[in-house]
Amino acid sequence: MTCILTEKPSVARDIAKIFGAKDYKDGYIDGGNFVFTWAFGHLIELAKPDAYGYRGWNLSNLPMQVNQFILQVRTKKIRNVYKTDPDVKKQLDVIHGLFQRCDYIYVATDSGREGELIFRYIYSFLECKKPFMRLWISSLTDEAIKAGFKSIRPGSDFDNLYKAAKCRSEADWLVGLNATMALTLKADNKQVMSLGRVQTPTLALICQRYTENKNFKSEAYYRLKLTSEKDDVSFDCLSENVFEKEPKELLTHLEPIEFSVVSNVEVKQKNEHPPLLYDLTTLQREANKKFAYTAQQTLNIAQKLYEAKLITYPRTNSQYISDDIFVTIPELIQNIEKYPDNALSSVAKSLAGKRLNQRSVNNNKITDHHALLPTGQNAGFKEDSEKAIYEMILKRLLESFSDVCKKETTNVELLLKDQVFKSSSTKIIIPGWRVFGNHDDDDDCQIIPELIPDEKLKKKSLVIEKYKTKPEPIHNEDTLLYAMETCGKHIEDPDLREAMKESGLGTPATRATILETLIARNYVVRKKRQLIPTETGLQVYELVRDKKISSPELTGEWELFFNRIEQGKENPNVFMNKIKSFVSEVIGEIQNKELDVQAPKNMILCPACKKGHILKSENNWYCSDYRNCSFRIWPVAKVFLTAAQARQLCETGKTDVIKGFQGKSGAFDTCLALDDTFNVVFYKPKKENNPDHDSRNT
């Protein structure tokens, strides 16, 4: 019997269908000579520090150095205590039983570094010795899967890939946990001060842009604006010269001149290629611009669409598809013809039978996954946000395979005596891929009449225009995601720059989590669409801004090592020894640094311990001194308290009436209060002339 292990249940179902396996069991699919089972991402993780004897948070533990890492079943935090995740343990037991029964294992986890690590950690933890083969594919069409099994490769071919992945995992553990413990103990403000290889450079990007923006001193500059006219069409030109002071004398000198002379006219036509298909990052960026969705919200929505079989795997870093996927595009476009939105269906019909643009087709630019595509399944949405993201993906598909857009650009130079004035204008000749008419805002809408060199134009007006230099805007999620994706471009070392070319900071799947971690740690807050560093975030940035842990170069160096390990050109032990030295260096820098990190102002004091302050996570409100204080405000009857409600509860012991609690009998409104042991309970205020009131524990 052969056991086929995938990274996700949906992939196992897709592969099992090809093999004709239909006998669904608890945790696997039985197909006779083949059984198909799955992981849920990482089932196995590196053990926590106490497994190596590093108990508690104290300086004597530093640096925590590990020679032989211990693997454990993935845990999750349950009321401030890390416990083995029961769902993970159950599935791991299923895999263990199948591994024991089978003769061979086919590895069908995602084709990439992390997919390899997921399998190898399971294989190692279960102490399995069965031979295994590797399925390496970049798409999940039936044809691609069948071709992959025909050319299945020995697992040993990917040993170096596993070594690189293992180094990444262990290095992140060493650097992240050591640096976090060192800074937390140094700050001693009852709040975890988290540092990490990707998290800290991301914080630096936010803080650097913020401080540059706030410290920017705007300076005035001036240009002359000439308005000319031909055939009743007026247009503006700006002086080529830029002036630090108002050019009043020059204006006086030029005002008597009635005509300007056309000194140069240049008309060019150019083709504008359609945009590439979406990867996760470009989808997140555009959803942030269009709908103000956070990166995490967009990822969550895309994941729901994926699980509903409406789109392909969302956590992709590729904007390309392979030749075998391209064959399916006409059918996908044909499916969109039936979509109820008239704009989408009409564009899809216009592409029927046409030769499709192939800019997004490139086999060599696909690694783990291809670009985001609809699956062609019937659409059904539970929320408007799902419909919005789905239609973005449909529109991008239609745009990407449409014709080029043809534009005409006109550049004009006018002479007013000895002063040169310039203007430009762009107009669309053939819309091509601009099929939805929502991309014209980047075009210059000014109309310039047809001009001939040396002809004279009537001067309508000449005025001084004042401008001010502007700083780079404070980061929002759109610009931050772009900065994370492209930060490697600014690295001077060519080898490091090349190593980061396809990666940047984090991955599409982790960037949203990194940002949410910075917010949960109270390093960054959202204000409208801007990402603003807190006092604590700025203080941490000041501490590490000149250190390697805050620089993208660190990721670049690691990626360079990983690539060389994958190629068999570098010894993993050499890399890990460098990491251990780096850990000691980071701890020394933190411990020797003068540091004054205080609890942020206007925070909510913890009512239980009176020492920590209340922070918001994705799941609850919790005490910043959570190592010593277990106070939590969990969602109550499906209501997650707002900041104002949490403050009122903590500071006064009770809240005003809160609406929208969900009970067995329907929605109801009531108050919340803290009991004597700081548990949250329902509370009914006393009414006048009625001393009775009731409460029930939540």
Image: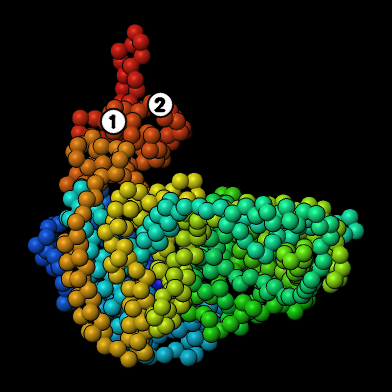
Identify which amino acid the numbered label 2 is placed on.
Val
Place of residue 22 in the rendered image (x, y in percent of width and height, measured from the top left): 49, 72
Residue at 73% across, 75% down:
270
> Which is nearer the eye, 1 or 161?
161
Place of residue 418 in the rendered image (x, y in percent of width and height, measured from the top left): 74, 66
Place of residue 15 in the rendered image (x, y in percent of width and height, measured from the top left): 49, 77
**Image quadrant occupied by the N terminus:** bottom left
Name the residue that disc number 1 marks.
651
The answer to whether residue 395 is left or right of residue 515 is right
Residue at 30% across, 50% down:
536
Residue at 33% across, 53% down:
538
Quadrant hosting residue 25:
bottom left
The kind of secondary structure element at disc 1 is helix
What mark, if any, has residue 417 been given in the picture? Answer: none
Question: Is residue 463 among what the camera can see?
Answer: yes
> Which is nearer the eye, 266 or 597?
266
Place of residue 412 in the rendered image (x, y in percent of width and height, measured from the top left): 76, 68
Q: How far apart are marks 2 and 1 (CA)?
A: 16 Å
Question: Is residue 337 among what the camera can see?
Answer: no
Q: Is 114 situated above or below 253?
A: below
The furthest residue to the right: 231
What mark, if any, has residue 657 been given in the picture? Answer: 2
Identify which amino acid the numbered label 1 is placed on.
Glu
Q: Which of marks 2 and 1 is nearer the N terminus?
A: 1
